[in-house]
Image: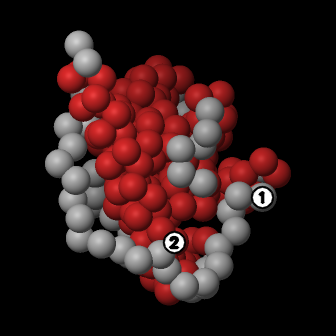
Amino acid sequence: MDQRQLVKDCIRQKPLAQEQLYRHYAPLMLGVCYRYTKSLHDAEDVMQEGFVKVFLHINDYNSTGELGAWIRRIMVNTALNYLKKNKKYRAEMVFTDTPLHPVTDLNPQVNLDAKELAELIRQLPTGFQTIFNLYAIEGYTHVEIGQLLGISDGTSKSQYARARYLLMEWIGKYSSSKQQRYAGK
């Protein structure tokens, strides 16, 4: 797939090019959207809305960076807007500057596969999940996260620390129960 030609054809609104771009990037982008939502249905809605934005703004893509990264940024921003607009998520998107839970350097020896870890991350409260994904997975800084979510960078840091603490706690429990299950066989 010649990316430059594909983008040019999408700018010209050629349906075959749009379909090719969609088919190529949709599976990856659905995963991105699913990390921010609590259901596959919501993730699909976010992805569809994101691709509408991609096709509306494809002429803004300047070809200096990777097309997939540009599309990913649109998907992340679309997901964040979806969380802010959707009542069931908005109620969980409360960020406070209360003191942190203690964070330890304990790194439990765990044998989790990516799917199991992703599912644990999805169980975090929406605010924690969002900040964890933005920082640990997408690579945003706490300053950038603060700007995206309208919070201070300190709040972003504390929410990330809490998310990390919860995950470490859950991973420890998960690891113990997993070991017990295998020992019982």
- Check the image and report above or below for 169 versus 9: below
User: Which numbered dot is residue 159?
Assistant: 2
How far across and down, in percent of the image, does residue 12 sit?
51, 37
Seen in the picture, residue 83 relative to 154 is either above or below; the reply is: above
Residue 133 sits in which quadrant? bottom left
Which residue extends farthest front?
A: 184
Give the mark count: 2
Residue in the image at 24% along x and 31% along y: 179
Residue 91, label in figure: 1
Q: Which mark is residue 42?
A: none
Closer to the camera in the image, 109 or 176: 176
Q: Is residue 138 left or right of residue 146?
A: left
Q: Is residue 9 above or below residue 144?
A: above
Amino acid carrying label 1: it is: Ala
Label 1 crowd bin: few (<14), some (14–19), many (20+), radius 10 Å: few
Residue 95 at least partly seen: yes
- Left or right: 150, with 130 as reference point: right
Is residue 145 shown left or right of residue 178?
Answer: right
Q: Please, what secondary structure does the residue beneath circle 1 have?
A: loop
